[in-house]
Image (cartoon, grey):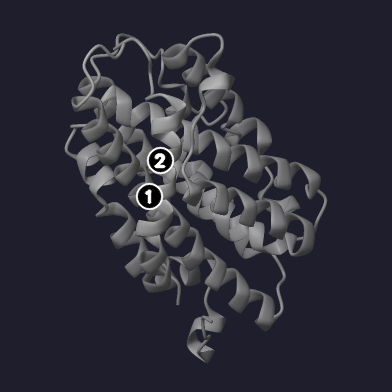
Amino acid sequence: VYSLSSKTYDSDLSEQIKAATQETHVRAENTDLMTSFQKGQITRTQYKVLLCSLYEIYTALEEALDRNSSHPAVAPIYFPQELDRTEALERDLEFFLGSQWRSKVIVPAATHRYAQRLREIGKVKPELLVAHAYTRYLGDLSGGQVLGKLAQKAMELEGKDGLAFFSFPGVSSANRFKQLYRSRMNSIELSEEQRREVLQEAVDAFNFNIQVFDDLQKMLSVTSESAEKPKGTSRSTPFPPPSSVQLTVGLCVGLLTVGIGLYNF
């Protein structure tokens, strides 16, 4: 569990989270999937499976925030019109997967665990949602804007179709909004124990992301190997057949058992 020094406790919550998550933030950026993204080497297949997981995560997060919008720890950082990503992700998924996209959404076990954690704390400890909202939304407003341009170039997309996730029409200035968000978050009154739990949850949030990225990369690796063997498989399907996906997800669970133990501390 994250421990607070007297010096740390005196600083702003946003600064505490930044300090507490520095190591895991770097690890998240250095996963294979994110490294490919940052190099501008993201493929449409990679992006599709990433969108599916983001949809699952943001749906759980935003449903929990909506239910707890009047909670004293959530109300100050509740900006649904400016920040919500669920509808944007729905538009992107429809662009890439077609009108029947809901039946084609496939996510690995790590994504389910992440979403389940969000639903759980939304019910029992809503103040911990602050950690997830902060790490996700401010990340989207920061590096996410660069990733959007890289994705557009790598996938040779014209216009903004398929890239709604990276667009925040309700935010006129990302920098000014981030300052407002940090100020609101720093105004939240938390006990020392709650503050410690929020910092630990922020670390866990990055660990969940690492597990999702690694899980997706393994899923893509296994399915690409499987796809090379059978000949005559239709190339028009956005994802492999259900039987192949079930096998992939099962392998992911086994492969990540060791990883989860290393990530959580």
Q: Is 117 positioned to the left or the right of 111 in the image?
A: right
Report the residue at 37% width, 25% height from top.
Answer: 240
Callouts 1 and 2 close, C-beta under 8 Å: yes
- Residue closest to the eye, 230 or 202: 230
Q: Is residue 78 above or below residue 85?
A: below
Residue placed under numbered mark 2 in the picture: 247
The residue under label 1 is 251
Q: Residue at x 73, y 55 (%)?
A: 122
Q: Height in image: 184 above or below 92?
A: below
Residue occupying the point 39% across, 50% down: 252
Q: Nearer the viewer, residue 27 or 140?
A: 27
Mark yes or no: residue 101 visible. yes
Disc marking residue 178: none
* Visible residue check, residue 141: no
Badge 1 amino acid: Leu
Residue 158 in the image: state x and y as whole percent.
30, 9
- Residue 12 position, x and y percent, is 54, 71
Question: Tag 2, which secondary structure?
Answer: helix
Task: Give SS at disc 1.
Answer: helix
Look at label 2 and name its amino acid. Answer: Leu
The residues bearing labels 1 and 2 have C-alpha atoms spaced at a distance of: 6 Å
Crowding at label 2, few (<14), some or many (≥20) Cα neighbours within 10 Å? few
| Residue 138 appears left or right of 130 | left
For residue 90, which quarter of the picture? top right
Count of labels shown?
Answer: 2
Q: Position of residue 219 (x, y in %)?
A: 34, 41
Q: Position of residue 257 (x, y in %)?
A: 41, 64
